[in-house]
Amino acid sequence: MAVNSRSMTSRASALLALALSFTPLLTTLSSPASAQTSYQKGQHIEPAYEGWRPNPDGTFSFMFGYMNENWLEEPDVAVGDDNFFSPGEADRGQPTHFLPRRNRFNFEVNVPADWGDRELVWTLKVNGVERKAYATLKPDYQVDNIVIASETGSLGAGTSSPESRANVKPAVEVQGDDIRTVRVGEPLVLRTKVVDDGIPKASRESYIEADDLMRRMMRPPTRITVGKINGLFLSWNVYRGEGEVTFDPPLPKPWEDTRTSANSPWGAMWLPPEIPEDGMIETTATFSEPGTYILWARADDGGLYNDDYITVEVSE
């Protein structure tokens, strides 16, 4: 019997519900030698410098991400004393809304061709703890597509193939105006076109047999490093803006949610969504509070990604 990605057998759902019921507010791993503590909220965020790559015009792109130590809390930190770059302009396009856990290659900062050996520093203070990420053009930090695919878990560490080297990042284009207006509680329709070259080949289909589903649920982890399931998907999220935004239907997460049942390509049971033949994906966004929001669309084929953004002015 085949099971669609939107549904599961009642037995599987029951087992999944049972597993989730044991998720505590504070979880400590059982091994005394490597005990780690996971928190739902109240912890800091580590900004991360992921590396740099050259641009065709001679400039360079510094690539940043972060590790939010919380599993649930999504802090909002406005550009200013607690979220800034130095030297130079404090606002370099960094996020002010932070998703849970590890978010790699979240954004890039362009620096001029004559940057030299200077440092660009991102300072972030969350829940009373200040952390910094230091970006330089040191050769050891240069990245390419293979490094990105490896770091995000699409490839095994230190591996590549002719297919992975031929991969081109997916194209993503939000249809319509770059700036939208909407009222609180009024759904905003987002139509996004996603096109990809089919590389890397999807790790699995968008459906799964019931028996295979059960085996995956019971199978222990097979690798200690982060592993990602290859498959094209679109994700919409808040990049800047302090109110709650609900996206319908819920789309896969762009952050490394490794829990078995997570709607994330890093979750063991995740299935790539079915992409329409014309590549057009429709989503609605509904806002809980007035304000100015930047929404972030990311298309990801497993190995590489591409981003687009829109600004939304939300009134009462």
Image: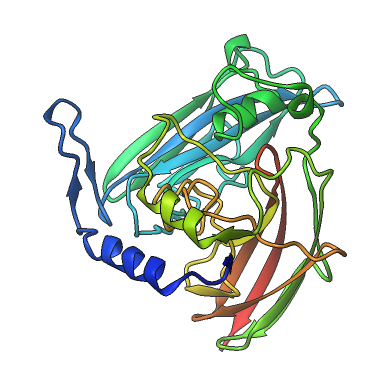
Q: Looking at the image, is 52 positioned above or below residue 167?
A: above
> Is 274 situated left or right of 46 in this image?
right
Is residue 198 visible to us here?
A: yes
Rendering coords of residue 132 (x, y %): 41, 32
Quadrant assignment for the C terminus: bottom right
At a point 71% along the width and 28% down the height, the residue shown is 145
Rendering coords of residue 64 (x, y %): 56, 35
> Is 240 situated left or right of 182 in this image?
left
Q: Quick one: 189 or 164, which is closer to the camera?
A: 164
Quadrant assignment for the N terminus: bottom right
> Is 73 situated left or right of 167 in this image?
left
At a point 46% along the width and 46% down the height, the residue shown is 83
At a point 63% along the width and 10% down the height, the residue shown is 139
Q: Looking at the image, is 54 positioned above or below residue 46?
A: above
Number of disc labels: 0
Rendering coords of residue 266 (x, y %): 50, 46
Q: Quick one: 231 or 91, which is closer to the camera?
A: 231
Rendering coords of residue 137 (x, y %): 63, 16
Is residue 297 visible to us here?
A: no
> Is 80 situated left or right of 57 in this image?
left
